Image (spheres, grey):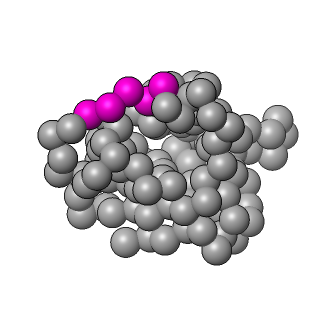
Amino acid sequence: IYSSSSPHSNNTLSVSILQESSFNAQSIELLRSENSVQINGDWFQLTSSNIETLSVLLECGLDDEYITGAALESILSGKNEIDCDDNAGAMRIKRLRDNLGGQIIASKFIKHVPSKGYQVTSSKDNIKLG
C-alpha cells in the first residue's frame, strides 16, 4: 500500500508514480511500532515480517555492508547461519520488494550483488530508524 500523507491515511495511490520516475532513496524513516516506512516522503504500510527484513537491511546499510540471504534468514529466524538456506532470505527480500511496489522499484532500492549479497541503495546519512 502506498500513501502520500501518513501511515494511517485512507488515501491510497498507485505506485506507478514511483515507477515512472528514476528512483533515488534520499530519505528513509522506519517506524517499527507502526509497521510502516517513509521513503522520500511517501508512506508504505508493511507486514511485521517485512519491517524486520527492512530493518536488518537498513542496519547493514548504516554500516555500508552487504548481507547474504542465509545471514538475513539467520538473524530473523534465530537459527545458526550454517542451518539457513540462502533462498529463504531471498524469499524474504522478494516479499518485501512486492510490498514496496513490485520488483521494478524495489530492485532499485534493494540491490543484489552476486557473491556479496543485498544492500539498500541509500546513503547512511539518509537512513533513520525508529
Quarter of the image where the C terminus is located: bottom left
Is residue 113 visible from the viewing direction of this image?
A: yes
Of the pair 85 and 68, the residue shown nearer to us: 68
Q: Is residue 100 magenta?
A: no
130 vs 59, left or right, is left
- Residue 122 coordinates in the image, percent (x, y): 67, 58
- Residue 91 coordinates in the image, percent (x, y): 52, 29
Q: Which residue corresponds to the image point at 64% horizontal and 74% vertical from the top-left? A: 125
Q: Is residue 15 magenta?
A: yes
Main secondary structure of the magenta stretch: loop
Of the pair 130 and 74, the residue shown nearer to us: 130
In this rendering, the answer to whether 3 lies above or below 33 is: above
Q: Quadrant of residue 64?
A: bottom right
| Magenta segment | 12-16
Residue reaching furthest right?
115
Q: Which residue corresponds to the image point at 54% horizontal and 62% vertical from the top-left? A: 27
- Residue 73 coordinates in the image, percent (x, y): 52, 44
In this rendering, the answer to whether 15 lies above or below 63 is: above
42 vs 24, left or right, is left
In this rendering, the answer to whether 43 lies above or below 11 is: below
Of the pair 24 and 108, the residue shown nearer to us: 24
Count of number-bearing discs: 0
Q: Which residue corresponds to the image point at 25% horizontal and 54% vertical from the top-left? A: 6
- Residue 110 coordinates in the image, percent (x, y): 63, 43
